[in-house]
Image (cartoon, rainbow, N blue to C red):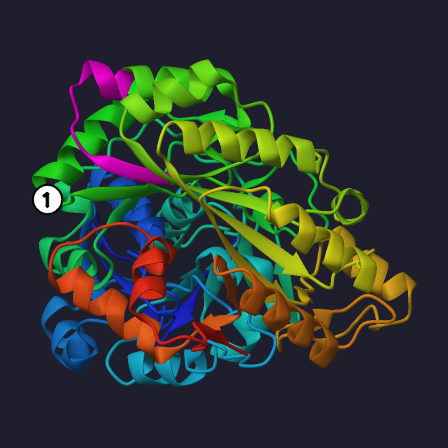
């Protein structure tokens, strides 16, 4: 017999179209608040399927919670959780704690099914469904599963085979294998509500977009393959270029491409940049790049298409540590990529994870000495490697007896290589920062954050680290730009 969802007042059955309230539960604002792009993608899928949507962003209009639920009277409520925690080993701020109270508050206003999703949720689907008391969840890419769930719940049909579905059965929480979503949907201004877009433009100076999904690389700590899968899938370049144009019409002067790495495919990066140039888009943008496989021709093309800022996931400047992190590039690759960017006056930043597997006091010093060769680059270093379930790092930590296989990793848990301590690594990094002015260690101090906010109000664009040189000129000798 088909499973049916029993709700107050009887079985839940409503005609098409449905009213869907989409809630961004993200509270993370460090280093800057990020527009909830996942909701925009889900909104496009719902809108194109004929459903009516309304957004509630808890960073913007939480005070209108009761009003919006009461006036909109949703048939379904979708909650997106983007971040689990801040990934700072000493601060360890978490962002899932309010899920239980959020779900209870929704229940005071409606009996509509509550469906959880988002990148953060997808890492801990069973644990967060249990915590939130939501009816269902969608792990991985949300569009196909969310649409399918709406349809079967309306008709009272069996929902157990929906891809990516997280649900309860016989006292257990089960998760179905995730689905992949078509990437040919067009996101319009309707999928980035004006009130929401204006807020993030003011708060961070940018909007964002995605050009591809899936990551085939095997970095030991990374959750991208868990969330998006390993199969590389591209959005049509013309669709991406048209989205650039729409973001510009919405007031964006700067856009960040949120792909795990934009140059995972040289062909994709080339064809996307060529489409941007054909559309004559005049807007600056930044992206994550892998410091391998870059050529002068590709860097020239990206710069002509508007690339002004690069964030390299370098992770270390020691080949020994890079190998232990399962990076298949070397410091020579990093050095060449940095020089290609410098020659074209494209600002770049290297993010380091210090203290992970294979790290030693000697490799830390090697990273610092090598960093002196990276001209005109900013370096952001964090301590410790966050352990997430489903990663190689998790398996290694279990094998080494650092954690139990059934450890609750929802509370932030970090890996530090044997022989290293948190205090030791921080001390060494702060020593590096005193000797080399291009290092940011840990979380930027309030003074730096305040400077960034003042520059935002003057319509200065770019990622938070791009103001580092300005702060260096303004700070007092010996003053720190970061803290633990």
Q: Is residue 46 visible?
A: yes
Question: Where 264 sits versus 44, above or below?
Answer: above
Quadrant hosting residue 456: bottom left
- Percent position (x, y) of residue 13? 30, 58
- Percent position (x, y) of residue 248? 13, 38
- Percent position (x, y) of residue 227? 55, 48
x 41%, y 51%: residue = 149
Q: Quadrant of the C terminus?
A: bottom right
x 14%, y 78%: residue = 64
Which residue is tagged 1? 250
Question: Where 74 sits versus 331, above or below?
Answer: below
Q: Which residues are magenta?
A: 275-286
Which one is nearer the viewer's eye here, 236 or 49?
236
Question: Where 37 sits versus 257, above or below?
Answer: below
Q: Is residue 283 magenta?
A: yes
Question: Where 339 sits versus 321, above or below?
Answer: above
The secondary element bearing badge 1 is classed as: loop
Q: Quadrant of the N terminus?
A: bottom right
- Seen from this angle, which residue lies furthest right? 400
Which one is nearer the viewer's eye here, 155 or 484?
484
Q: Is residue 299 magenta?
A: no
Which one is nearer the viewer's eye here, 374 or 214?
374
Number of numbered discs visible in the structure rendering: 1
- Percent position (x, y) of residue 74? 21, 65
Determine whether, in the image, residue 242 is placed left or right of residue 85: left
x 66%, y 55%: residue = 368
């Amino acid at each position: 017999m088909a499973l049916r969802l029993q709700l107050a007042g009887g079985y839940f059955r409503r005609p098409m179209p449905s009213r869907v309230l989409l809630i961004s539960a993200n509270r993370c604002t460090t280093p800057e608040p990020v527009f909830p792009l996942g909701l925009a993608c889900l909104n496009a899928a719902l809108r194109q399927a004929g459903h009516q949507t309304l957004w509630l962003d808890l960073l913007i209009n939480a005070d209108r919670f009761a009003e919006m639920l009461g006036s909109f009277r949703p048939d379904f409520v979708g909650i997106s959780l983007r971040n689990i925690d801040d990934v700072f080993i000493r601060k360890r701020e978490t962002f899932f704690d309010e899920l239980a109270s959020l779900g209870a508050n929704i229940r005071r206003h409606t009996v509509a099914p509550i469906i959880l999703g988002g990148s953060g949720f997808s890492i801990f689907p069973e644990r967060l469904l249990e915590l939130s008391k939501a009816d269902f969840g969608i792990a991985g890419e949300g569009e196909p599963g969310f649409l399918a769930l709406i349809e079967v719940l309306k008709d009272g049909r069996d929902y157990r085979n929906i891809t990516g579905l997280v649900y309860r059965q016989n006292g257990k929480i089960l998760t179905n294998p995730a689905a992949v979503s078509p990437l040919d949907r067009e996101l319009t201004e309707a999928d980035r509500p004006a009130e929401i877009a204006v807020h993030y433009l003011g708060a961070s100076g940018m909007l964002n977009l995605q050009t591809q999904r899936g990551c085939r690389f095997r970095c030991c700590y990374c959750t991208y393959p868990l969330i998006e899968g390993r199969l590389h899938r591209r959005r049509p370049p013309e669709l991406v270029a048209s989205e650039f144009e729409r973001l510009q019409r919405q007031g964006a002067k700067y856009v960040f491409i949120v792909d795990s790495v934009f140059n995972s495919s040289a062909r994709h990066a080339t064809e996307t940049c060529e489409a941007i140039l054909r559309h004559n888009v005049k807007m600056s943008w930044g992206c994550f790049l892998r410091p391998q496989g870059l050529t002068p021709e590709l860097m020239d093309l990206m710069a002509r298409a508007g690339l002004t800022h690069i964030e390299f996931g370098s992770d270390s400047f020691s080949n020994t540590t890079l190998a232990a992190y399962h990076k298949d590039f070397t410091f020579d690759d990093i050095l060449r990529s940095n020089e290609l960017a410098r020659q074209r006056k494209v600002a770049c930043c290297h993010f380091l994870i210090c203290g992970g597997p294979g790290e030693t006091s000697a490799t830390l010093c090697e990273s610092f000495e090598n960093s002196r060769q990276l001209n005109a680059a900013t370096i952001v270093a964090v301590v410790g490697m966050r352990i997430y379930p489903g990663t190689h790092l998790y398996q290694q930590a279990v094998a080494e007896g650092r954690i139990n296989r059934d450890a609750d990793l929802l509370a932030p848990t970090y890996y530090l290589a044997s022989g290293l301590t948190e205090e030791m690594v921080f001390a060494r990094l702060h020593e590096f920062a005193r000797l080399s002015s291009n290092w940011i260690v840990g979380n930027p101090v309030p003074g730096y954050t305040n400077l960034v906010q003042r520059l935002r109000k003057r319509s200065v664009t770019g990622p938070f680290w791009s103001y580092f040189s300005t702060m260096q000129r303004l700070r007092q000798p010996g003053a720190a730009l970061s803290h633990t």
